Image (cartoon, rainbow, N blue to C red):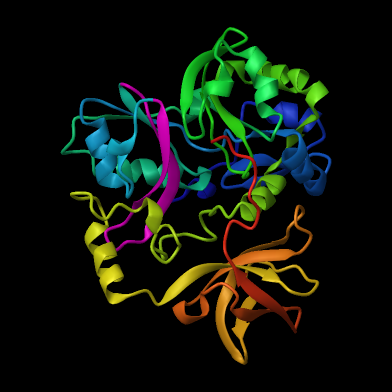
Amino acid sequence: MSDADITIRRTPLYNIHVAAGARIVPFSGWNMPVQYEGILAEHHTVRNAAGLFDVSHMGRVEIRGPDAVQFVNHITVNDVNRLTPFESQYTMACYEHGGIIDDFLVYRCPDRILIIPNAGNRSKDLGWFRQHADDFNVEILDLSEVSILLALQGPHAEAILNPLTDASLDELSFQHFIETRINGIWARVFRTGYTGEDGFEIWAPAEYAEEIWNLLISAGADHGLRPCGLGARDTLRLEAGLALYGHEIDENTNPLEAGLGWVTRLKKPSFIGKESLLKIRRNGLEKKLVGFKLLERGIPREGYGIWHKDEHVGTVVSGTLAPTLGYGIGTGYVPVPLSDPCTILSIEIRGKHIPAEVVKRPFYKGGRKK
């Protein structure tokens, strides 16, 4: 059973969102703000100034114990041993057959590992972790209900957050993090995000949710900060070429065909799914995930057909009219011979075939901190 099958939840900031006029929709078992003033306005705010997202529907898991690093290395495809303390990496957990259970960031603390599962996969992930923990001296803690996660994203994010912390954020590199205080409140501040822009994600105690949210909104008033919903988060991540579980990746896709071989360390001694992924690599891929842009007006949507000449060759898994770029973009799986950049395909939109060109991802390159 997924989290979406359980009673609809609310984050500690639900009343704040309602009071601010957000449009609330169900998402992965949670009532979440999809937009405030509008997806386009919020998208451009993040690209040009800063946006604040409540992403507390995501999980917060701690792996503690002397075998924490060894255990997480066993259940994920990337190599945690490559991380120094207070550094993070993008990774995935896979089934034995190579299908993707979930993708997430792993953060290495001096004495524990942090994992941020996707909202709809939290229960599934925790069950999988615990199922494979018997041979390791670890403790698996679900801290999702006692903490919040906020995302402050955009080129003005550092200027907004820096004066509020005890740290110097200009020295914090991308995918690194610190434990600090925000106006006296303990928090973890990660230089990570899901938008393609510079920014931070903030893990803090749930009882301070409204205080921290209001503090950030107030501090950002002179920097163009606005609250943003999940609608803009989706268009931002798609422009940035980032995968969304249930769209670009799921249990029926593997990291190699999804273009995520760069985080799949097949030379690691062992991890769940390794043998199947090695076999898939030896046998060769049949399909690959590609990005495409429309060459004429139109908006590609999930489920639309992808065609090559007169043959149906795939299905759009994500698509939108890219607000930053001004044209339609999307992703989908196609046969390997059709996956090279500059290949001409077409997308069936309302009975018409709109020409599209395979392009490299990301579609948009933002200003992430080096």
Q: Residue furthest bottom?
A: 310
User: Quadrant of residue 185 in the image?
Assistant: top right
Please report the bounds of the magenta region as a residue range.
Answer: 86-110
The image quadrant that residue 72 belongs to is top left
In magenta stretch: residue 50: no
Residue farthest along the top direction in this orientation: 184
Query: At which x and y percent is residue 133?
Result: 23, 39
Residue appearing at x 58%, y 74% in the figure: 315
Q: Is residue 344 above or below residue 129?
A: below
In the rendered image, residue 143, in percent from the top left (x then y), is placed at 44, 27
Q: Quadrant of residue 139?
A: top left
Q: What percent of the width, then of the height, locates residue 285? A: 37, 74
Is 65 on the left or on the right of 181, as rendered? left
Left/right of residue 254 with respect to residue 249 in the rendered view? left
Can the viewer see residue 23? no
Prevalent SS, magenta region: strand
Task: Please count the marks in the image.
Answer: 0
Q: Is residue 97 magenta?
A: yes
Residue 354, horizontal then vertical, whole percent: 73, 79
Residue depicted at 57% across the width and 30% down the height: 201
